[in-house]
Amino acid sequence: MDRQQLRALQEPLKQQYRGDATAALVTLRAQGSLGGGITCSVHTGRELAEAGLHPASGGDGLSLCSGDMLLQALAACAGVTLRAVATSLDIPVTGGTIEVEGDLDFRGTLAVSREAPVGFLAIRLRYILDTAATTEQLDTLLRLTERYCVVYQTLAGAPQLSSQWETASGNYKPQP
């Protein structure tokens, strides 16, 4: 896809959203089904992915770790966003990789230590690009990729989260 094709696809959407901000509000959904053992199957749109415990928390390594899936989602989103920005600004990028790594202290998730956090302590992205872009173009590409990457901004901004619990029989009433 080139710059003109991308703009031809996006411009009508931009015009629509400028005129009707509610048209830009979309709710994305994911669903998981509890499986046998300690697993949960998630439909990815293309195939079924079975998530389970990471080996550092007792898993056998045969199921996907949800922490790995989060990092994979970040790599995918950053890559797609980078491609879109590069295409839109006509910055030459012929290929490359996005490496994402994150540090976890499993003492937190296993309730070994209340001082150890549950979740990632740090997440690092590394872009290795095949490009003839100038330093200025690369600075712009990095800045705009970070700005417009949905997963990056979600992690950076800590969205409002909520949970609702219910049972299939409907007999669960949360305690006040």
Image (cartoon, rainbow, N blue to C red):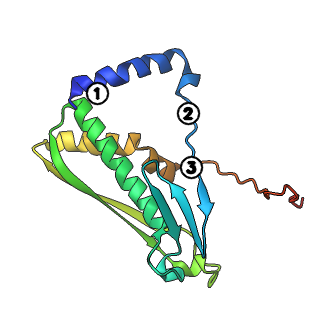
Q: Quadrant of residue 36?
A: bottom right
Residue at 18% from the left image edge and 36% from the top image edge: 91
Cα–Cα span, label 2 and label 1: 21 Å
Cα–Cα span, label 3 and label 2: 13 Å
Q: Which residue is mark 3?
A: 30
Viewer-nearest of discs 1 and 3: 3
Q: Amino acid at mark 2?
A: Val
Instruction: Establish if 37 lies above or below 89.
Output: below
Instruction: Establish if 77 lies above or below 113.
Output: above
Q: Quadrant of residue 110?
A: bottom right
Q: Which residue is mark 1?
A: 6
Q: Amino acid at mark 1?
A: Leu
- Which element carries disc 3, helix, strand or loop? loop
- N-term-proximal mark, 1 vs 3: 1
Quadrant for the C terminus, please. Answer: bottom right
Front residue of 22 and 160? 22
Instruction: Establish if 139 lies above or below 69.
Output: above
Task: State if disc 3 and disc 1 touch (CB < 8 Å).
Answer: no
Q: Which residue is mark 2?
A: 26
Q: Residues within 10 Å of mark 2 (few under 14, many from 20)?
A: few
Q: Amino acid at mark 3?
A: Ala
- Which element carries disc 1, helix, strand or loop? helix
Residue found farthest to the left: 132
Residue at 58% from the left image edge and 72% from the top image edge: 117
